[in-house]
């Protein structure tokens, strides 16, 4: 019997992470949004200012019978740089920080164990700075952010940033991609 869980992940621009996580088997829904700040129901413009404290995130609903939290975390840590504080590539600010908002104590433990594993394997030359927090509030992003890459594949950001990440993801994670 399917067990559905949600986890909220922030790895820079949510257009990139949404595009990648929608491709994974066992992922039922990916919703871009904002979490981790103090302003209720923030707008994209407010979040981009850095003043709300929110990060651009995706809420991932997944079937644990088809994909594990550990597999999701492996993908997450491989598609962004968890060692840069408040930055992913040219996207700079607290809204682009590496952060995981867990929904269960089992998820929290899985995240901590994954960071220990990556650290002991020396996957990165610098320390992982990913924040780990319980999910308080998730605010869904405006409609025009949903499926941004699919709707705007020729946009410059999509061509220069998302396409290379998507190719790298597909090369590395073939076994986890939906048929």
Image (tube, grey):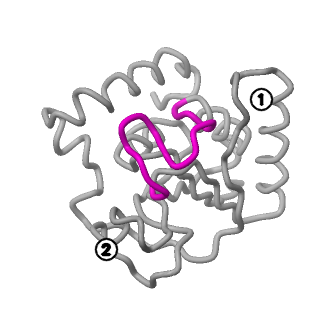
Which residue shows up at 39% across the image and 27% down it?
A: 166
Total numbered labels = 2
Please name the predominant secondary structure of the magenta segment in the image. loop
Cβ atoms at labels 1 and 2 below 8 Å apart: no
Q: Nearer the viewer, residue 51 or 163?
A: 51
Q: Residues within 10 Å of mark 2 (few under 14, many from 20)?
A: some
Closer-to-camera residue (164/31): 164
Q: Is residue 120 left or right of residue 17?
A: right
Element at badge 1? helix
Residue matched to label 2: 43
First-in-chain label (1 vs 2): 2
Q: Is residue 163 above or below residue 158?
A: above
Rendered location of residue 116, percent (x, y): 85, 36
The region drawn magenta spans: 79-95
Which numbered tag is attached to residue 118? 1
Q: Rounded to the nearest whole Å, what is the CA distance between mark 1 and mark 2? A: 34 Å
Q: Is residue 61 left or right of residue 47?
A: right
Q: Quadrant of the C terminus?
A: top left
Residue at (69% x, 61% y) in the render: 102
Residue 54 position in % (x across, y down)? 48, 67
- Residue extending furthest toward the top: 171
Q: Is residue 85 above or below residue 168?
A: below
């Amino acid at each position: 019997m399917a067990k559905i869980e949600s986890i909220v992940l922030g790895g820079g621009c949510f257009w990139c992470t949404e595009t990648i996580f929608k491709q994974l088997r066992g992922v039922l829904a990916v919703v871009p949004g904002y979490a981790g700040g103090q302003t209720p129901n923030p707008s994209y413009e407010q979040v981009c200012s850095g003043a709300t404290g929110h990060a651009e995130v995706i809420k991932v609903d997944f079937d644990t019978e088809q994909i594990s939290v550990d597999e999701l975390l492996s993908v997450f840590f491989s598609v962004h740089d968890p060692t840069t504080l408040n930055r992913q590539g040219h996207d700079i600010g607290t809204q682009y920080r590496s952060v995981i908002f867990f929904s269960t104590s089992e998820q929290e433990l899985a995240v901590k164990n994954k960071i220990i594993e990556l650290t002991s394997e020396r996957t990165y030359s610098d320390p992982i700075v990913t924040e780990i927090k319980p999910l308080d509030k998730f605010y869904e992003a405006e409609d025009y952010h949903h499926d941004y890459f699919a709707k705007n594949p020729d946009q410059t950001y999509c061509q220069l940033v998302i396409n290379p990440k998507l190719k790298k993801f597909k090369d590395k994670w073939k076994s986890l991609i939906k048929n």
